[in-house]
Image (cartoon, grey):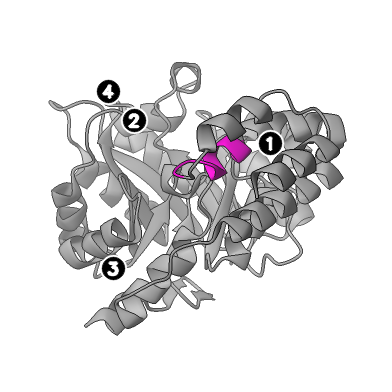
Amino acid sequence: MNALLYKPVSIGSVHIPGNLFLAPVAGYSDRAFRSICIAEGANLCYTEMVSAEALWRGSDKTEILLLRGENEQFFAPQIFGGEVDSMKKATRILVEKYTPSLIDINAGCPVPKIIKSNAGSALTRDPRHLYAITKAVVDEAGSIPVTIKIRSGWDAKNLNWKETSQAAYEAGAQAICLHARTRAQGYEGFADWQVLGELVAFIGNKLPVFGSGDVFSPEAAKEMLEKTACHALMFARGAMGNPFIFRQTRDLLLSNSYEAIKIEDKVMRAMQELDLLIVDKGEELACREMRKRFSAYSKGLEGGGQMRLAIVAATKKADYEEIFKNFL
């Protein structure tokens, strides 16, 4: 049974060898982190969400979000926007300039500034508009498969995942990811995996359904796959500081066991991530951004608290090297 849980996934014409994905995580899933996750067994990594408006207007900040890792066999940018024309223009740029394997539509972000632009979770309030957005992206993408990430609904009284998923399917989306929380929940409370299972039963025979929400361990990943029968799952916060969760989950699904991660391996991967980030952003900015990431890597380590106190003051690569040298 376990071997059946880890399996290939076909999204339209794109065939992914396994079903353990990295979700789009704003401020985290950049090229550096995606590259580390792939090295640790992630089968597919989505980019951070990219503003459709900023993309077609030529924002420099958007350019860096769309850098592709050398080890990324599949490139899956996620875009968000509330206007059909902007999403159409952004899709055209993605196709012509970035040759994506997939294009994902964000219909799940609960952040107020995203919702104010009628994007993210706001799309779930109007399935007809979600259909129009999705149809525009699908038509412009041509042969490139389009996926969409939704939430279970706007709030507990408006659980319309069935209507939004049906609209996305009819518009031509070739996979749906459900973060099984409402917009009102944000990232609080618990994800309702029962709703995920119901979505799989509702539409899973027509296109693959991916699960997201509360997958913080290999055991939780296995439980989600078993309980919901979703075709793939997306790690989000569960992968922060822990890219090893992909390898560990794969091992658990295939052999019913996995190895603990050595401190040396955590330090090695963290430093590799820093090196990759330096290439993209320069040493000063990379070292500043890596403070939160190194802190995440250090969670659960004996003496991790002292390490984090030192990390928040690090300003260059040599500082981190000295911190880890002393710690090890």
Instruction: Judge whether 61 appears above or below 105 on screen.
Output: above
The residue carrying pointer 3 sits among few (fewer than 14), some (14 to 19) or many (20 or more) residues within 10 Å by Cα, namely few
Q: Amino acid at mark 1?
A: Met
Mark 1 secondary-structure assignment: helix
Tell me which amino acid carries mark 3: Lys
Which element is circle 4 on?
Answer: loop
The residue shown at (39%, 34%) is: 129
Rendered image: mark on residue 206 = 3
Q: Quadrant of the N terminus?
A: bottom left
Structural crowding at the residue carrying mark 4, measured as other residues with C-alpha within 10 Å and reported as few (<14), some (14–19) or many (≥20): few
Q: Look at the picture and state if 59 lies above or below 328.
A: above
Distance between the alpha carbons at the discs numbered 4 and 1: 30 Å
Q: Position of residue 314 (x, y in %)?
A: 75, 28
Residue located beneath label 4 in the image: 184
156 on left or right of 264: left
Q: Are marks 4 and 1 in contact (CB under 8 Å)?
A: no
Mark yes or no: residue 19 visible. Answer: no
